[in-house]
Image (cartoon, coloured by chain):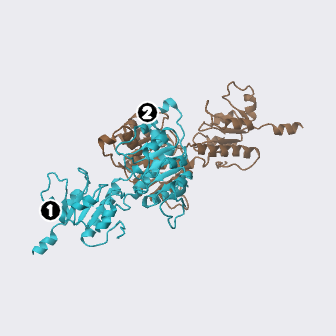
Chain colours: A brown, B cyan
Amino acid sequence: MAAAADQEAPPLLILHRLPNFKLSFFPLLRAKYTVLDPHGDPPDPSFPALSKAARLMLCVGPTPVTSGVLDGYPAVECVVGSSAGLNHFDLAACRRRGVRVTTAGDSFSDDVADYAVGLAIDVLRRVSAADRFVRAGSWPVQKQYGLGSKVSGKRVGIVGLGSIGSRVAKRFEAFNCNIAYNSTKVKPNVPYTYYANVVDLASNTDVLIVCCALTDDTRHLINEEVMTALGNTGVVVNVGRGAHVDERELVEFLVRGEIGGAGLDVFEHEPRVPEELFALDNVVLSPHHAVLTPDSLGALEELIFGNIEAFFSNQPLRAELELELN
Amino acid sequence: MAAAADQEAPPLLILHRLPNFKLSFFPLLRAKYTVLDPHGDPPDPSFPALSKAARLMLCVGPTPVTSGVLDGYPAVECVVGSSAGLNHFDLAACRRRGVRVTTAGDSFSDDVADYAVGLAIDVLRRVSAADRFVRAGSWPVQKQYGLGSKVSGKRVGIVGLGSIGSRVAKRFEAFNCNIAYNSTKVKPNVPYTYYANVVDLASNTDVLIVCCALTDDTRHLINEEVMTALGNTGVVVNVGRGAHVDERELVEFLVRGEIGGAGLDVFEHEPRVPEELFALDNVVLSPHHAVLTPDSLGALEELIFGNIEAFFSNQPLRAELELELN
């Protein structure tokens, strides 16, 4: 009887998040699991003991999972993530401890790809700038509004042809664009031109779209040399992470007119955006927003709940990282 | 000798345009043809006589070609147009007189389709509104920015599946959207769902894209009934003509929140835009701009010069309207 009662107790789950960060499905989570929250208000007196026994951690958004964090939760076998990025995970530490890691997988990929295309059209065809022109009442006064640049047929260069990048490519193909890409390796069965380095890609590209993962290798990947190669009609769209781009350099290129424009959903020091950009009509600025629609949050919720259930019933996990074991 | 000299004289060509409207290729035109300009400054004393003998008229932009205009130019056999729309031509009058008419054909179709997709993404994902939010410095203050609505998978309804509409459809297919359309007739060999009337189309649509020709039948096609059918999450994108939409009704629907949003490149009384729209975040406003990029102007120039040359050398015209002869 005691064993049966144990089996029925809701499993323990550590809620790893920034203080005050909430998602709509937290109440549902608490209904099904014993949610251990280090930021509980009032603090949960059982947290120190129970959290040592919890086998699963739900990591909300890009909350860092470092070796030190894992030290505090010695029984954790699995981190269920909710983010498309990986740069907040110390993957080496997870690998060493045999901790499995899942991500948001494809939940956000369509939304990010849609947004990247929207930013590119917006910068090239000057949509947001046109909206500003009309709202300022300038149309009846100035009559003519400056032309933008054609989207169809442009050469689109994609940095990182993963789940997001391949969706960006598919969309731009329908605009008769020529697609090329850079990634760590050539992708098999892909009809697009491969460039082993980003400078070469930028030299052969009108619109450079950054959608790779942020790692030590891709930090400031879009640097002075890449922007010079892209040239004064080239456009950068960043839906990856702010640190992919050398932002100070980008601002200088834009201010000097040495690059054609930029569509930026991410910045190096969010929510700070370099104010020099506010005066420019050839940039579109967005508050790290590409990833989110209510629909993608629904898909993510389904993935997270599915993975938590799968873990506790020894079923296969979805969107699990392959961590090579040493 | 006199006959040879006559043959070498540049052919006469009437430049039919609004006063002061200029295009970059006018100098080239004057180099090859005797351009007769009713708005010449100073006035050309030979205009009245020569214009009576001119066989070709170049109609620049949507300058009206009425029966009265044609009365003034009795020798005109061909009007070479430069616009995608037809509503400025009195086609019945052209037909009666046996005057041939050419249009801009497909020159602008890619640009308009690209822009329609850009407006749809912008309204759904709130791109211009996000840009406004960031430029106003609101991001560090308000932290969270309201979510938009997913683009991928949406039901897209296209009003007018012609040269522009079919390109809009192709682009949205790459976003995994479900495409349906309304037009005067079912199109053969088209995989999209056909609705014989716009209300039914709107009832089954998330985003309604207007890209048909403006005729007496399509004036105020997007009326109260259609907007009601579209509903309070539905979006209207208009890249056709302002008069396709009952603008006063649309403004009321938007102000009351009974329609989800609108992306408008055209208006009923351009350059006047209803000021109530300036306060709304779910609309994107654009100064009749979808049609134009330097690239499409280049393609148009090629088409126009080709047609003028073809006419004077009795070769077939491109993008000629089929005017049924009585």
Residue A211: in sight, yes or no? no
Q: Is residue A274 above or below residue B110?
A: above
Label 1 neighbour load within 10 Å: few <14, some 14-19, many 20+: few
**Label 2: chain?**
B
Name the residue beneath numbered marker 1: B49
**Label 1: chain?**
B
Image coords of residue B80 (percent x, y): 29, 63
Write down the quadrant of residue B75 in the picture. Answer: bottom left
Name the residue beneath numbered marker 2: B136
In the visual, does B41 lie left or right of B181?
left
Query: The N terminus of chain A lies in which quarter of the figure?
Result: top right
Image coords of residue B82 (percent x, y): 31, 59
Instruction: Determine the secondary structure under disc 1.
Output: helix
Q: Which residue appears at 71% of the width and 39% of the height?
A: A56
Label 2 neighbour load within 10 Å: few <14, some 14-19, many 20+: few
Q: Amino acid at mark 2?
A: Ala
Q: Amino acid at mark 1?
A: Ala
Q: For this rendering, which residue is in front, B284 or A305?
A: B284
Image coords of residue A159 (percent x, y): 49, 51
